[in-house]
Image (cartoon, rainbow, N blue to C red):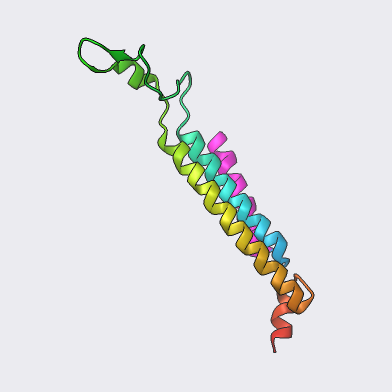
Amino acid sequence: MLYAMCFFLFVIGLYCALVKKNMVKIVIGIMIMEYAVDLFLIMLGYRAGGVAPIVGKDEFDAVSGMVKSSFINASVDPLPQALVLTAIVISLGSLSLMISICIRTYEKYGTFDITEIRRLKG
């Protein structure tokens, strides 16, 4: 059910990005899609009753010199968390670029409507 909600959130963002004529609404739709993908990646790494993947003295087997298999089976995968942190930084950069393009376009044409901008182009 939660994965379907992520898909639904992605579809809402896709609808905003493809159908809306206002540049700011298009940017908001793209950001909603990015957040839906981030949420999906976080849910992929979720494990019920999972523990943080930080190895301490309790998780280390002194006899064999290796990490206990029970800890490995119970720990959460840190890769989706790292991917989402990277995606958040990249989405912040893309958001600032899209907003700056919107601002410059508004300064030049005086509107956010993409059909009006196409008509004014000549």
> Please, is residue 31 above or below residue 22 in the view?
above
Taking the spot 76% from the left edge, 74% from the top edge, the residue there is 107
> Please, is residue 81 above or below residue 31 in the view?
above
> Please, is residue 20 above or below residue 56 in the view?
below
- Residue 97, by quadrant, is bottom right
Main SS, magenta region, reads helix
Taking the spot 59% from the left edge, 39% from the top edge, the residue there is 5
Number of numbered discs visible in the structure rendering: 0
- Residue 112, by quadrant, is bottom right
Percent position of residue 85, x then y: 51, 42
Segment colored magenta: 1-19
Residue 84: say if magenta.
Answer: no
Taking the spot 50% from the left edge, 34% from the top edge, the residue there is 43
Q: Quadrant of the C terminus?
A: bottom right
Percent position of residue 61, x then y: 27, 12
| Front-most of residues 48 and 92 | 92
Percent position of residue 56, x then y: 38, 17
- Residue located farthest toward the right when viewing the structure as drawn: 110
| Front-most of residues 5 and 44 | 44
> Please, is residue 59 above or below residue 34 in the view?
above
- Residue located farthest toward the bottom when viewing the structure as drawn: 122
- Residue located farthest toward the left when viewing the structure as drawn: 64
Q: Quadrant of the N terminus?
A: top right
Taking the spot 30% from the left edge, 15% from the top edge, the residue there is 60
Horizontal side, residue 91 vs residue 16: left or right: left
Percent position of residue 28, x then y: 67, 55
